[in-house]
Image (tube, helix red, strand yellow):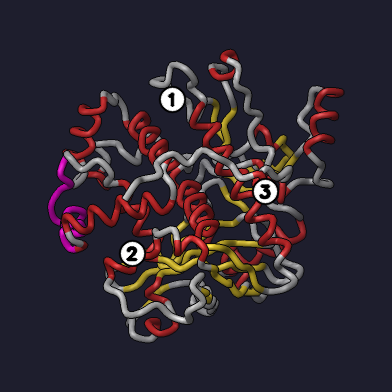
């Protein structure tokens, strides 16, 4: 089967004004300039903006007149205990964070590729907000793949990941150390950050379905038990090229996506490390939930398939602050018009999901409207995991006060 590797075209519908996340230019001077590069995109930060949200044209006009970025958010610095209003162009980012010095033609190319993905995600999340009054949201499988990819990369690109994710001497990487060192040597990679950027490029250049296909090929070769054994008992063979696809596949197949709406009069808060934040424990399993706050109104939550209604009561003891939230997995409608697929093997089902036919399947998500205690409980998970060097942002001070008071009581 031919592989469609590069994923560089952005549909016209995704060229949404709501994104405007990166001022991308093709000239060589800008391709090599220093940049403040966000790990939380501007289009998400704008949902928390102080004052009215302005169009891209209005923002550019005001910037030309004043030389000042006209967009601001509340920003609480944990280390100093200070609360102020800061330009969203200078928060939740790091100078030159994605610069790849190995790419001599354009060291900022990865930032540009991220901007392409962010434009598509911004369009999807805008439509998600428009669907709130209806209570349901529908996505085609291909578009759902884009959203899944965006969420995974939002976790992977987190501020703490770049230097540690592939650090050979990190305790969590002990079993993967031979693979990390051998892979870096084979590719001429000299640091953990370079390896992190190399894998980021793979995720960005490869479509959701092709990453799943890469993982499926590894599963077919080594078996699921064999791959699990590599991670827990043995080590990863140094010659595996696309092992990062297995981590991606674990997120895609191990969690069902749900959309949670904050209670009326309440809001979700944003923290520096809140994308992909895990919550909840079961026997021999941690991470019953992966939380992604995308606005004061919406949190996208990946819930473990172990908590699907038909499995939840058979798990044994569970520890989670969010178990009283009961999202319903999406209802699937097949493009063929059939209600169900014929009985397929696990391998055949994986092949179907990445086929052209399946790309037109649709998924209807019932939006889960939270109560006030449930909204505060999700915010408390975020606050519990904020580090001493971290930060948080919120839309209204009144609702932030509710959240802080509830957290202190919990």
Q: CA distance from mark 3 to mark 1?
A: 29 Å
- When the figure is inspected, residue 94 is found, relative to residue 202, above or below; the finding is above
- Marks 3, 1: nearer the viewer: 3
In the image, residue 70 lies at what x, y percent? 79, 34
- When the figure is inspected, residue 50 is found, relative to residue 354, above or below; the finding is above
Of callouts 3 and 1, the N-terminal one: 3
> What residue is pinned by disc 2?
350
Q: CA distance from mark 2 to mark 3?
A: 29 Å
Residue 164 occupies which quadrant of the picture?
top left
- When the figure is inspected, residue 385 is found, relative to residue 131, above or below; the finding is above
Of callouts 2 and 3, the N-terminal one: 3
Q: Is residue 161 visible?
A: no
Q: Is residue 100 visible?
A: yes
Q: Helix or strand or loop: what does disc 3 sit on?
A: helix
> What residue is pinned by disc 3?
13
> Crowdedness of circle 3 by 10 Å Cα count: few (<14), some, many (20+)?
few
Q: CA distance from mark 2 to mark 1?
A: 34 Å
Is residue 228 in the magenta section?
yes
> What residue is pinned by disc 1?
100
In the image, residue 16 lies at what x, y percent? 70, 45
Q: Which residues are magenta?
A: 225-238
CB contact under 8 Å: marks 2 and 3: no
> Crowdedness of circle 2 by 10 Å Cα count: few (<14), some, many (20+)?
some
Of callouts 2 and 1, the N-terminal one: 1
- Marks 2, 1: nearer the viewer: 2
In the image, residue 68 lies at what x, y percent? 78, 26
Q: Nearer the viewer, residue 96 or 199?
A: 199
Residue drawn at (77%, 59%), measured in percent from left and top? 398
- Answer left or right for 201 relative to 242: right
Tell me the quadrant of the picture where the C terminus can be found: bottom right
Q: Helix or strand or loop: what does disc 1 sit on?
A: loop
- When the figure is inspected, residue 248 is found, relative to residue 320, above or below; the finding is above
């Amino acid at each position: 089967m031919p592989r469609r590797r590069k994923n560089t075209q952005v549909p016209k519908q995704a060229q949404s004004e709501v994104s405007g996340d990166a001022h991308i230019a093709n000239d060589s001077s800008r391709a090599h300039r220093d940049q403040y590069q966000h790990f939380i995109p501007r289009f998400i930060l704008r949902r928390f903006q102080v004052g009215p949200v302005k169009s891209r044209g209005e923002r550019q006009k005001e910037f030309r007149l004043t030389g000042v970025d006209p967009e601001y958010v509340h920003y609480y610095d944990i280390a100093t205990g200070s609360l102020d209003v800061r330009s969203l162009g200078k928060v939740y980012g790091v100078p030159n964070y994605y610069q790849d010095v190995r790419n001599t033609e354009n060291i900022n190319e990865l930032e540009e590729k991220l901007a392409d993905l962010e434009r598509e995600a911004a369009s999807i999340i805008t439509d998600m907000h428009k669907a709130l009054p209806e209570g349901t949201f529908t996505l085609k499988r291909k578009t759902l793949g884009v959203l899944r990819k965006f969420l995974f990369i939002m976790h992977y690109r987190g501020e703490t990941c770049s230097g540690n994710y592939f650090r050979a001497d990190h305790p969590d990487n002990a079993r993967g150390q031979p693979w990390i060192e051998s892979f870096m040597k084979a590719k001429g990679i000299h640091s953990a950050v370079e390896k992190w950027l190399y894998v980021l490029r793979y995720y960005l250049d490869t479509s959701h379905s092709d990453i799943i296909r890469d993982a499926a090929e590894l599963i077919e070769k080594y078996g699921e038990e064999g791959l699990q054994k590599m991670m827990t008992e043995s080590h990863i063979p140094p010659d595996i090229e696309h092992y990062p696809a297995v981590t991606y596949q674990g997120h895609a197949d191990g969690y069902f996506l749900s959309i949670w709406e904050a209670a009326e009069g309440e809001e979700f808060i944003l923290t520096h490390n809140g994308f992909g934040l895990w919550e909840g424990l079961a026997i021999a399993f941690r991470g019953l939930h992966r939380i992604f706050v995308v606005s004061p109104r919406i949190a996208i939550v990946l819930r473990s398939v172990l908590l699907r209604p038909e499995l939840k009561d058979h798990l044994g003891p569970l520890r989670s602050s969010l178990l009283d939230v009961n999202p319903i997995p999406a209802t699937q409608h097949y493009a063929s018009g059939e209600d169900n697929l014929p009985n397929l093997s696990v391998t055949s089902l994986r092949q179907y999901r990445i086929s052209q036919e399946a790309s037109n399947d649709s998924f209807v998500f019932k939006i889960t409207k939270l109560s006030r205690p449930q909204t505060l409980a999700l915010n408390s998970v975020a606050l519990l995991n904020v580090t001493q060097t971290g930060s948080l942002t919120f839309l209204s001070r009144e609702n932030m006060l509710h959240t802080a008071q509830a957290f202190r009581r919990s």
